[in-house]
Amino acid sequence: MKILSGKDLEDIYNKNKEAIIRIQREQDARKMPTLKDMVFRYRDLEGRAYYGFSADQHMPLQRFGKMKDYLMWMTSSISPDELITLVREGSRILEEGIKHPSRAARIGLILSEIENRANMTLHTELLMNYLAVQWAREDESPEFFNNQIQLEKVDMFKKELSEGDGRFFFQCEELKNLWSRWKMSESEFQASWRESLQEQKNMNLIIQMISSSVEEYAAAAQILKKD
C-alpha cells in the first residue's frame, strides 16, 4: 500500500476542490445550530432570551458576513449611515456653491469630522451591532440575518445601558477577543466608551449645523466648542 505524501494529498485536493467544498458545505448545513443548541447569554427588559454560538459551533454565513462588516466599520470608527450623511450633505453644499464663507466652513467641518473619527478608539453603536449579530433572539432564526430584529436588539441594548457605563459589553464572551487584540483594560474601555458617546452627540450636532441657516450654524458652533 502506498503511503500518501503531503504533495499527493495536495494534488488530490486541487483536483477535487469543488466537490470537497460542496460536501463540506452540505455537512455544515446539517450541523447548523438551532436555538436549543446555543448558549443562553442574556434576557432583555421585555423578558426575551438571547443565545450565542459556542466555541465549537459554526456561525451561519449570513451572520458571519455581517459581523465582519461591522468589524470593518469599527476600525474606521464611523458607521455607514454617518458616512453617507456627511458625504450627502457635502455634495449638496458643493452643488449650491461654496462662495459664502459659512458654506466653505461646513465643508471643512465635514472633512474634519471624518478625520477625527480615525482617531476614535471605540464606536458604541457599531459595537452594539457587532454583538447583536452574534446573538440570536428567541424569536429569530440563528441561520439568517434579520435586519428588523437587529435594529430592535440594538435599541434594547441602548435602553438597558446607563449613559457612560458599558461594563456589560466589556464582560461579554463574544467581545473578549476585541479587548485582547486591542490590548484594552476595563478602565481604558470605560474611558473610550464615554468618549464615543460624546463623539456621537457631537456628530448629531454637526449634521444639524451643516444643514442649518447661518444663524443656527453660529449657535450650534458655540455649543460644539464648549463640548
Image: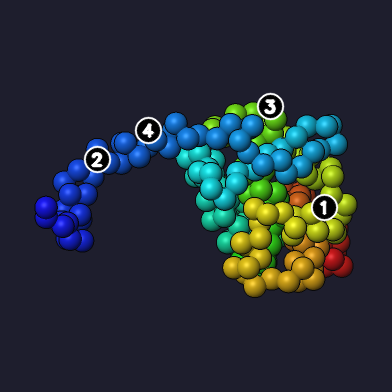
* Res. 133 image quadrant: top right
Q: Residues within 10 Å of mark 1 (few under 14, many from 20)?
A: few
Label 4 amino acid? Answer: Glu
Q: Which mark is residue 139?
A: 3
- Which residue bears the numbered disc 1? 216
13 up-or-down from 28: above or below: below
Horizontal side of residue 83 vs 210, given as left or right: left
Q: Residues within 10 Å of mark 3 (few under 14, many from 20)?
A: few
Question: Disc number at residue 18?
Answer: 2
- The residue tagged 4 is 26
1 or 3: mark nearer the eye: 3
Check disc 1 and give the amino acid type.
Glu
Q: Nearer the viewer, residue 127 or 221?
A: 127
Mark 2 crowdedness (10 Å alpha carbons): few <14, some 14-19, many ≥20: few
Q: Residue at x 16, y 46 (%)?
A: 15
Q: Secondary structure at mark 2?
A: helix
The amino acid on which the numbered mark 3 sits, given as a three-letter code, is Asp
C-alpha gap between disc 2 and disc 1:
61 Å
